Amino acid sequence: MNPLKEIQKKLTKKSSEKTRASFLKFVPNSQNIYGVKVPILNELAKEYKDGGFELVEILWNSNSFEEQLLAAKILTQISKKNPDKTLNLIKKFSKNISNWAVCDTLGQQSVKPISKLKQKEVFDLSAKLVKSKNFWERRFSLVLLESYKKDIAAREFIISIMKQLENDKEYYVKKAVEWTKRDLAKLK
């Protein structure tokens, strides 16, 4: 069976209306939603990680909330196999993020395994996206830096990105700025 069809069948089987309603409430900008809990998505990511980068792209392009989360989670597990391919996919995917949950999963989890190896490239991407007209890309520019918050040498760059977003009018960008400020204050 086609892996996408197989995954879609499992997502449909594992879905619940209660979970779907919860996602619609807490992730209001989500696209098509099955209603599958995150722990189940984590299990599926482990099960399908051998599908590699090709499956990640197929899942991302299917444009369902859970399928995009699953794509980001599989990417996390395989990112070290090809860090350059991972970064290229993250850049590509950043263009069509449509909610905070996918944004944060892709920005935090997918980058984390390669964050030390690809710090310059991640910082370059963040510096580019902070200027985007797309507010999800602006949020993503800050979320990408989550893995570096404990690195004292990286804080100056994180603060510079945060300052560029401080007066942003978009709710989800403001939330990322507040979250980053709180986290950095705890680390002093």
Image: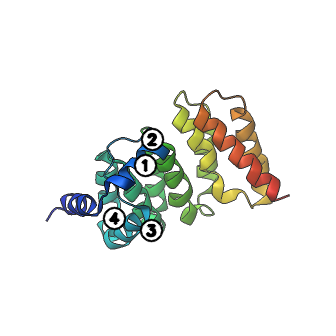
**Within-10-Å neighbours for mark 1: few <14, some 14–19, many 20+:** many
Residue that carries the numbered disc 2 in the rendered image: 97
For residue 15, side relative to residue 99 (left or right): left
Q: Earlier in the sequence, mark 2 or mark 1?
A: 1
Check the picture and name the quadrant holding the C terminus. Answer: bottom right
Task: Please tell me the numbered disc located at residue 23.
Answer: 1
Task: Please tell me the numbered disc located at residue 77.
Answer: 3
Task: Please tell me the numbered disc located at residue 52.
Answer: 4
Q: Earlier in the sequence, mark 1 or mark 4?
A: 1
Determine the residue positioned at 63% across, 63% down.
Answer: 116
Q: Count of labels shown?
A: 4
The three-letter code of the residue at mark 1 reads Phe
Q: Earlier in the sequence, mark 4 or mark 3?
A: 4
SS for callout 4 = helix
Q: CA distance from mark 3 to mark 2?
A: 20 Å
**Within-10-Å neighbours for mark 2: few <14, some 14–19, many 20+:** many
| Residue 58 seen from this side | yes
Give the residue furthest to the right.
188
Nearer to me, 99 or 23: 23
User: How far across and down, in percent of the image, does residue 177 sit?
Assistant: 69, 41
The three-letter code of the residue at mark 2 reads Ile
Pointers 4 and 3 in contact (C-beta within 8 Å): no
In front: mark 3 or mark 2? 2
User: How far across and down, in percent of the image, does residue 4 sit?
Assistant: 23, 58
Nearer to me, 16 or 164: 16
The three-letter code of the residue at mark 3 reads Gln
Residue 56: quadrant of the picture: bottom left
Nearer to me, 163 or 42: 42
User: How far across and down, in percent of the image, does residue 87 sit?
Assistant: 49, 53
